[in-house]
Amino acid sequence: MHCFDAIQRHGPQWSNRTFFLEDEGRDVTVHERPDVASLAASGAVPVACVGARDLEIHGTKLPLVEMFLYPSEIQFFWWPGPAWTPACTQAFLGLLAELLDSTAVSQLRVDPRYPESSRRRLRDALAAAGFPPSRLAA
């Protein structure tokens, strides 16, 4: 929840993406259930997929960033395009750094489905951006 709280502080405009709330037997949005992080952390939902627009990081608003919330992790994904300027990419890295600082056990992990060469380049880029190697999972 610490990471989601940090994300909330950046004023996201939540999309209408829904996640299934098993106890209620229906799809809901973050607008309907702003306690989504607690639901995911407790296992009340096995996974919640939510989307955030206009996360403002150091004065830069990010395009749509979507995330899967699991009990012990957040997975980010986004759609490449012209809206992802170098400033947005730098701001997103700033958000990741903030999330790493929000809890002592957090780590960045590159999606294992990427080819090894792509994972290595991304890990190298994160290290060059100042992310401590100890916080970058293999």
Image (spheres, rainbow, N blue to C red):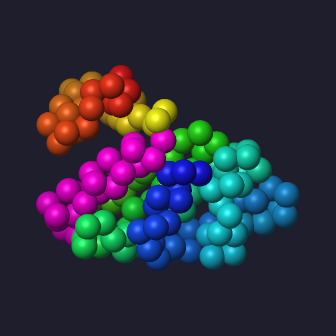
Residue stretch rendered in magenta on the structure? 81-103
Nearer to the camera, 17 or 10: 10
- State the image quarter where residue 125 is shown: top left
Q: Does the magenta stretch include residue 109?
A: no
Q: Does the magenta stretch include residue 88?
A: yes
Which residue sits at x=38%, y=27%? Answer: 137
Q: In this view, does 84 lie to the left or right of 135?
A: left
- State the image quarter where residue 81 is shown: bottom left
Query: Residue 86's spot in the image, x, y percent?
Result: 14, 60
Query: Residue 18's spot in the image, x, y percent?
Result: 62, 66
Q: Is residue 58 above or below residue 106?
A: below
- State the image quarter where residue 132 is shown: top left
Residue 25 visible to the viewer:
yes
Q: In this view, does 35 lie to the left or right of 133?
A: right
Q: What count of labels does the image hold?
A: 0
Residue 121 visible to the viewer:
no
Q: Is residue 45 left or right of residue 80?
A: right
Q: In this view, does 63 lie above or below 38?
A: below
Which residue sits at x=25%, y=37%? Answer: 131
Query: Residue 16's spot in the image, x, y percent?
Result: 56, 74
Query: Residue 97's spot in the image, x, y percent?
Result: 32, 47
Which residue sits at x=50%, y=51%? Answer: 3
Instruction: Report the quarter where the C terminus lies.
Output: top left
Query: Dominant secondary structure of the magenta stretch?
Result: helix
